[in-house]
Image: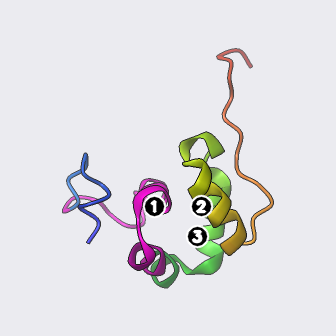
Amino acid sequence: MFQSILWSYDTQSLDPNVHRQTIVTAAINYGDLVHWRWLVKHYGWDGVRQSLTKIPETALRPGAARLAKCLFHLKGFSHASRSTRR
């Protein structure tokens, strides 16, 4: 089911728990309602919400990020650092 949105991965070797961020990011960006329902069924509303707060907003398409914010009641996403200095 995820091969169409995870085209650069070997989906047979992906572990839903180990590769959670990758799966959530791809499903939010490129998935349809079936993928989003799978996320909620597999990880739960809180699990998807937690995963989304760890994803930098720049990793999500703007429209997908806005929709995810609304549906999962998010205040925001993680911010990606623009500098290599800390």
| Residue occupying image coordinates x 65% and y 68% | 49
Is 55 above or below relative to 15? Answer: above
- Bounds of the magenta span? 12-38
Which labelled disc corresponds to residue 48? 3
Which amino acid type corresponds to the residue marked 3 in the rendered image? Val
Q: Is 25 covered by the magenta stretch?
A: yes
Left or right of residue 30, residue 28 in this image: right
| Residue occupying image coordinates x 50% and y 61% | 28
Q: Is 21 covered by the magenta stretch?
A: yes
Say what secondary structure mark 2 lies in. helix
Which labelled disc corresponds to residue 51? 2
Q: Position of residue 38 (x, y in %)?
A: 42, 79
Are the two marked residues, 2 and 1, in contact with CB atoms closer than 8 angstroms? Answer: yes
Q: Position of residue 86 (x, y in %)?
A: 74, 19
Which labelled disc corresponds to residue 20? 1
The N terminus appears in which quarter of the rendering?
A: bottom left
